[in-house]
Amino acid sequence: MTAVYEELGLPAAVNANGKMTALGGSVLSDAVVAAMGEAARSHVVMDRLLEAAGAELARAAGTEDACPTTGAAAGIAISVAALIAGTDPYRVERLPDACGAPDEVVLPKGHAVHFGAPVRQMVALGGGRAVEAGEVNKMRAEHLAGAIGDRTAALLYVQSHHTVQKGMVSLAETVRVGRAHGVPVIVDAAAEEDLRAWPATGADLVVYSGGKAVGGPTSGMICGPSRLIRACRAQYGGIGRPMKVGKETVLGLVHAVREHTARAGAAAEEAERQRLRMAELARRLGELPGLTADVVRDEAGRLIHRAQLTVDPEQAGRDAAGLAAELAGGDPPVFLRDHHATSGRLSVDPRTLGPEDEELLVRRLTSLLHGEPA
Ligand SMILES: *Cc1c(COP(=O)(O)O)cnc(C)c1O
């Protein structure tokens, strides 16, 4: 299965980190790969494909319309551009020059995160100017409202484990502030699983990644009302051009969203199966010298249970970051989730880890922590 990578001298990575861009996002189902292959074999009128695919994606999100993108990052840039320039071809082609239109995008300071690139830069790419409200660890609705003025084009809310998880204003409050000031709200819900939940908050444009929770190819989508989605599509004749989404990708996204929607009813049972799997893995790994292990729910509230390993550097002979680096440096490389490595914690994400990968991880950790050569 991995011959195409081996041909380039690369081993396939063992991914216990989650749906990470750095590890190629998601592994695609056979049906999604087949749809992409079939789409690649013929021509199609792209404008009509974007509309037809958008209509189906919108049904999954419960919105009037949707616009396929190359990813959530492009979704942010295109949403910002759409809210600044609308559908006017002159203004679309002048971006990132806003031609005097309101171009400020207000976001909580604690949401100005780096997801692999800075959110603020995606705003700039769409012709917007990011304005931070509140402080890193504390803000109130008044801070958000106070940052809104004549130049405000949008509010941006980032729903992610990357953001500061305390002292922030809820999305519901953000939507209320936006409504009160007549300012649309963009939600970056890149890695969220529930495609209907975020538009249902009353937010105007919701951006998802297709390559994360949805399990699709490297892609994304913007969901919202017809009027705004038309403006999003219009950006493909402007700043959206270097974010051009291909026909294969669009079909892969549509089929992945179909499968994701079909699975949604069983999401709770699947999460419970994963939780039990991680509990058993934690029990085994907790017996190794220098590790204590338990199961923790996702910090951003998603239905993901991960095995969390706390590394005692004295007993383990290296700290959490060191252990993660040794695993990543092995053959094949094994990647744990290391967001909290500086606090001594690593975790194992069940979604991307097959049963064989799990055994390999146990063997590798066992030999490292018992001081055997890898
Ligand atoms: C991953 C991520 C993005 C970017 O999504 P892509 O689909 O990779 O472009 C944007 N925002 C957040 C919070 C993310 O986690």
Image (cartoon, grey):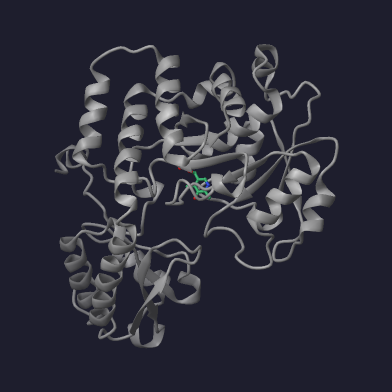
Vertical relation: 222 (above or below) 164: above
| Residue 38 visible in the picture | yes
| Picture residue at 61% right of the left edge, 25% below the top | 227
Tell which of 305 and 11 is nearer to you: 305
Q: Is residue 95 left or right of residue 115?
A: right
- Image coordinates of residue 112 in percent, x first then y, are 65, 51
| Picture residue at 32% right of the left edge, 39% below the top | 258
Q: Is residue 96 left or right of residue 313?
A: right
Which quarter of the rendering shows the C terminus?
Answer: bottom left
Q: Is residue 140 left or right of residue 248?
A: right
When asked about the image quadrant of residue 284, the answer is bottom left
Which quarter of the rendering shows the N terminus?
Answer: top left
- Image coordinates of residue 206 in percent, x first then y, are 55, 41
Tell which of 35 and 27 is nearer to you: 35
When asked about the image quadrant of residue 281, the answer is bottom left
| Residue 131 visible in the picture | no
